[in-house]
Image (tube, rainbow, N blue to C red):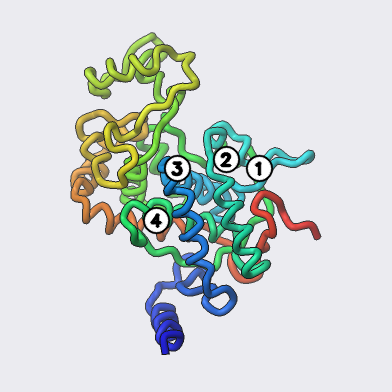
Amino acid sequence: MKVNILLLICVVSGILVACEGGQLRKCFYEKTCPSAEDIVRDVTWNHVSSNPRLPAKLLRMHFHDCFVRGCDGSILLNSTANNTAEKAAVPNLSLSGFDVIDDIKEKLEQKCPGVVSCADILALAARDSVSFQYNKSMWEVLTGRRDGTISLVREALINIPAPFFNFTQLKQSFARKNLTVHDLVVLSGGHTIGVGGCPSFSNRLYNFTGKGDQDPSLNATYAELLKTKCRSLKDNTTFVEMDPGSARNFDSSYYNVVKQHKGLFQSDAVLLTNKGASNIVAELEDLNKFFTEFAQSMKRMGAVEVLTGTSGQIRKKCWAVNSS
């Protein structure tokens, strides 16, 4: 009876879900690997329980994956003798958590060989890592992605939004992925967890316009505090919380930080330079509103340029393309 009820839920859900993201759908693995999503969650939660920094890392990895060739797991591929992969791009050098994805993949290959894609594993693990704090799924992840076979360092440099982007550049970057200004502001809320390296923002402290000046839009008191952490433009080893005092709590406090002109990156600060975006920042200070909107924007981002059906492949190892 329980199995029949689950099947009914999946069928009904499949009818109700809009056809965004090609053939992504609920319960994609219900017949081919029924325990797939449970395995991803259990392994992810086990890792997060001993490493609370993982949610920010896996969320960022998923974001960087989707902005280059879509959510196809290309960020997971290693460089080879003949190709330098996305991992080697400057924005990705600080990524970590690849071992978690490999651990999940190994468990799934033992249970259901050749069935669950690395792209789906990353999308689910990003969600599940953030969800650990609340002991429930914080957003819905439709599945059915297949894995890409191409990963190019230059494409990461071109497509991943930079922390020093102005509002127009950010808007254009998101628009290329069919994501709106609303999605831009909502997904920026991911900065409520994690840290940023000094090179990503220290120009705002010491050389904003190339004249040894400070970014006037940055809260002066906060800037002085940051200078005690990042002592010069040459500091490339220090990391600072993006959401001071709440960097391990997935909540809406990021938006309050931004409103106080304490956003760490220029890309945070510029959300206040556009009236529409600034209004959204104010709305998202409400925790329930943020959770609702973040869930919807993550669903849209997770469907960007996905490979489905017979496109791509199901990689046996997430770090390497299957040999023919």
Mark 2 against mark 3, which lies toward the viewer?
Answer: 3
**The quadrant where residue 158 appears:** top right
Foreground residue, 137 or 89? 137
Callout 1: SS: loop
Of the image marks 4 and 1, the number of the one nearer the N terminus = 1
Crowdedness near tag 1: few (<14), some (14–19) or many (≥20) residues, C-alpha within 10 Å: many
Residue 156: which disc? Answer: 2
- Could you say where residue 149 lies in the image, as x and y percent from the top left? 68, 54
Quadrant occupied by the N terminus: bottom left
**The quadrant where residue 165 appears:** top left
Q: Is residue 221 left or right of residue 59?
A: left
Of the image marks 3 and 4, the number of the one nearer the N terminus = 3
Q: Amino acid type of disc 2?
A: Ala
Q: Is residue 218 left or right of residue 130?
A: left
**Marks 1 and 2: CB-CB under 8 Å?**
yes
Callout 3: SS: loop
- Could you say where residue 16 lies in the image, as x and y percent from the top left? 37, 78
Q: Amino acid type of disc 1?
A: Leu
